[in-house]
Image: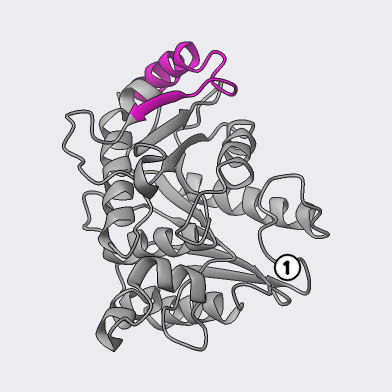
Amino acid sequence: MKSFVYAFSALMAVFFSAGIAAHPIVLPLYPDGSVHEIADGGTWEPEVHVYLPETSGGLAVVVCPGGGYKGLSFGSEGQSVAKWLNERGIAAIVVRYRMPRERADVPCRDVAEAFRITRSHAAEWGIDPDRVGIMGFSAGGHLASMALTTFKSDIRPDFGILVYPVISMIPPEAHGGSKANLLGHSPEEKTMKAYSSHLRVTAQTPPTLLVHCSDDPAVTPANSVLFYEALVHAGVRAELHIFPEGGHGWGFGAISFRYRDEFESILTRWLSEQNER
């Protein structure tokens, strides 16, 4: 019976996804108008851009673009990611989350709402509600890591993919810009610890893949190492790849990245493993 439900859902998704690669389903995170503080002084309202593959395998990824909690790299770390996922039969839900402007809880609230929306539309979109992961880049990686470590079980992601992520808010590993935009210029030590996601890892944290470059000039790879070590210590399935060069911000856009083929091969294999779990 379950297989019939997913087959029917996948068929429905084909109709909904016609032309979606170019024109996603765009839904407001707060359609009832309950949101009062709009991102970045009103530049955009928080919403999800839903990209559905022509043939759905049931797997879905909520995508959090980076931007230092000051803006969003919505192209190379959002739309292009969705296209890549769709080509592999994976639904992509790209979150246009609000900027915190020192209101640290705001981005997490938006991503939590994105998960509620995704799972509530699972049958309609041909998604298995128990196979919805999260992928984040840079500051979006920090946001994704907070979702992995702090969300309650009903909205928690089922797996995580963190690409050159900000993890720690504690010097010297902290990325100064992300930290200032999220927590302010002089946060208390307890606040920095609360938003250092490696300190929030438990045995309930979902399996996570981390990718970084040794020569990252913006976010030191020590961030990924800290999260990986915390996962291993907690007994969580984890995988870490640190490439010798590549810098920061290469995402899925036009920026040249020497190890792109290897990265995409690793990601394809790892997503396939999550699909089989």
**Above-or-below relation of 245 to 263:** below
Which element type, helix, strand or loop, lies under badge 1? loop
| Residue 225, percent from left and from top | 55, 80
Residue furthest front as drawn: 41
The total number of labels drawn is 1
| Residue 206, percent from left and from top | 38, 62
Horizontal arrangement in the rendering, residue 166 relative to residue 233 (left or right): right
- At x 64%, y 31%, the residue is 87
Look at the image and tell me whether residue 3 can be seen: no
Look at the image and tell me whether residue 110 can be seen: yes
Horizontal arrangement in the rendering, residue 160 relative to residue 190 (left or right): right
Q: Give the extent of the magenta segment.
A: 3-27
- The one of 88 and 162 positioned closer to us in this rendering: 162
The stretch drawn in magenta includes residue 16: yes
Q: Which residue is mark 1?
A: 247
| Residue 273, percent from left and from top | 54, 51
| Residue 20, percent from left and from top | 53, 20
Horizontal arrangement in the rendering, residue 224 relative to residue 126 (left or right): right
- The one of 82 and 72 positioned closer to us in this rendering: 72
